[in-house]
Image (spheres, rainbow, N blue to C red):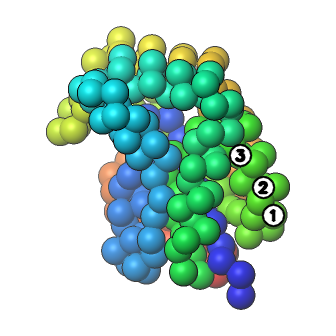
């Protein structure tokens, strides 16, 4: 069996991290996080982690190294992992989606995690790490949709899970999708 790459596109606050953590615990599958590329660069630049700095950094890295910079960095990490299943958190752009399709073909599976803006903004304002105001969250949404075409991978995902309720409901939906993949 070739390794399966399962990515979870979704806007901030949709529940991607909860799904990844749940699957890591349940199946012991490793993950690769697109956001690590941004955090590594922020550290190199000596900048604090903030919505503004993260956005500037993401857009700057893509401007300097091309739209596939994140995908190529994550693929390098994936190639080093020996596992039948690898989870990918925060696949952002349409270009990245296409690069993964090109590299992994039918072994690349996407499960979009969708929550309404109202639900996501409430979650983001209450999260312990990097909380966002409603204005910051909306600004991030618009920037990610307009500047890095994040809506494409969400729209073209193999599966979509609606996360408007509690975690047990989310995890039940994820279990059903994973059964189809296995």
Residue 159 rendering spot, x and y as whole percentages: 67, 56
The total number of labels drawn is 3
- Report the disc number at residue 97: 3
Residue 81 shown left or right of residue 180 in the figure: left
Element type at mark 3: helix
Q: Which residue is mark 2?
A: 101
Residue 106 rendering spot, x and y as whole percentages: 80, 67
Q: Which residue is mark 1?
A: 105
Disc 3 residue crowd, few under 14, some 14–19, many 20+, Cα 10 Å:
many
Image quarter of residue 129? top left
Residue 176 rendering spot, x and y as whole percentages: 56, 71
Q: Is residue 100 visible?
A: yes
Residue 31 shown left or right of residue 176 in the figure: left
Q: Residue furthest bottom?
A: 1
Image quarter of residue 59? top right
C-alpha distance separating marks 3 and 2: 6 Å
């Amino acid at each position: 069996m070739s390794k399966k790459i399962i990515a979870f596109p979704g806007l901030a606050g949709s529940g991607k991290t909860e799904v990844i953590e749940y699957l890591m615990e349940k199946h012991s599958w490793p993950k690769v996080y697109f956001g690590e590329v941004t955090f590594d660069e922020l550290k190199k630049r000596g900048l604090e982690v903030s919505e503004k700095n993260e956005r500037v950094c993401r857009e700057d890295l893509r401007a300097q190294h091309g739209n596939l910079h994140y995908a190529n960095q994550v693929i390098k990490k994936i190639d080093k992992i020996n596992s039948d299943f690898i989870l990918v958190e925060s696949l952002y752009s349409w270009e990245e989606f296409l690069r993964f399709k090109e590299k992994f073909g039918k072994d690349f599976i996407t499960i979009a995690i969708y929550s309404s803006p109202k639900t996501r903004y409430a979650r983001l304002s209450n999260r312990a790490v990097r909380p966002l105001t409603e204005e910051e969250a909306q600004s991030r949404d618009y920037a990610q949709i307009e500047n890095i075409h994040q809506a494409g991978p969400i729209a073209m995902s193999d599966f979509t899970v609606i996360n408007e309720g509690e975690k047990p409901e989310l995890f039940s939906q994820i279990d059903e999708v994973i059964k189809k993949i296995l």
